[in-house]
Image (cartoon, grey):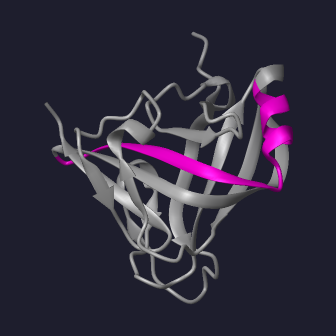
Amino acid sequence: MPTKSQKRVRKTGANEVWYKLPSGSWTCVGLINQGYVAPVDETTYDKVPLAGAKTVTIGGTREVGFEGQLAQSGKDELDLIDLLNNKTGELYVFDGTVATDYLEFYFKEVEFQVTSRKTEGQLQVIDFKCNAVEQDAAVSIADTGLPTVKKAAAGTYTGNKYYAKIQTAVA
């Protein structure tokens, strides 16, 4: 009986990373194999686990960012990653369902950096980090400013000086 090769299983879950292009449109960077919201200096603060093996550290003025791993298989996806490398822009992360709520993160400004590339089976696995840029005031976003895949209910969401955490009850 044949067995499934772990390296050939492509994650097709809902945990997505979206980046806002200079044109103003949102584009999907890819699906997250693993990822977390964390301080830029990981050794300084503890992380709290979230759904999908992600973690979050909440603090008003700490330097934070988003780090993750994407599994990519298409030329267009890989070209997009190359285009975004070392650029700054807005970032949206859909973390999936936590308990009875959808959990989403919106970063007003991040610097996107590819930290490594490797091949696993037929996939190109990309490790990346997004260093959040501190804003002058708390980050605030209306639901209409998020990508169309958002689960956020109508309204405006405010967070700390780096990102807004959005929780919406599952309908």
The picture quadrant where one finds residue 158 is bottom left
Task: Tell me residue 55's x, y (percent).
Answer: 44, 64
Residue at x 65% of width, y 48% of height: 69
Residue 102 vs residue 8, the one in the foreground? 102
Task: Tell me residue 169's x, y (percent).
Answer: 16, 42
Q: Quadrant of the C terminus?
A: top left
Q: Is residue 138 above or below residue 149?
A: below
Left of 46 or right of it: where is 74? right
Q: Is residue 9 above or below residue 65?
A: above
Residue 67 vs residue 71, the one in the foreground? 67
Residue at x 43% of width, y 41% of height: 145
The picture quadrant where one finds residue 1 is top right
Residue 140 vs residue 6, the one in the foreground? 140
Left of 76 or right of it: where is 9? left
Residue at x 73% of width, y 51% of height: 127
Q: Is residue 59 magenta?
A: no
Tell me the magenta residue range: 77-99
Q: Work out whether residue 121 can be spotted.
A: no
Q: How many marks?
A: 0
Residue at x 55% of width, y 54% of height: 35
Q: Work out whether residue 41 can be spotted.
A: yes
Q: Is residue 86 magenta?
A: yes
Task: Tell me residue 41's x, y (percent).
Answer: 64, 82
For this orientation, the residue located farthest to the bottom is: 44
Residue 169 vs residue 26, the one in the foreground? 26
Left of 169 or right of it: where is 75? right
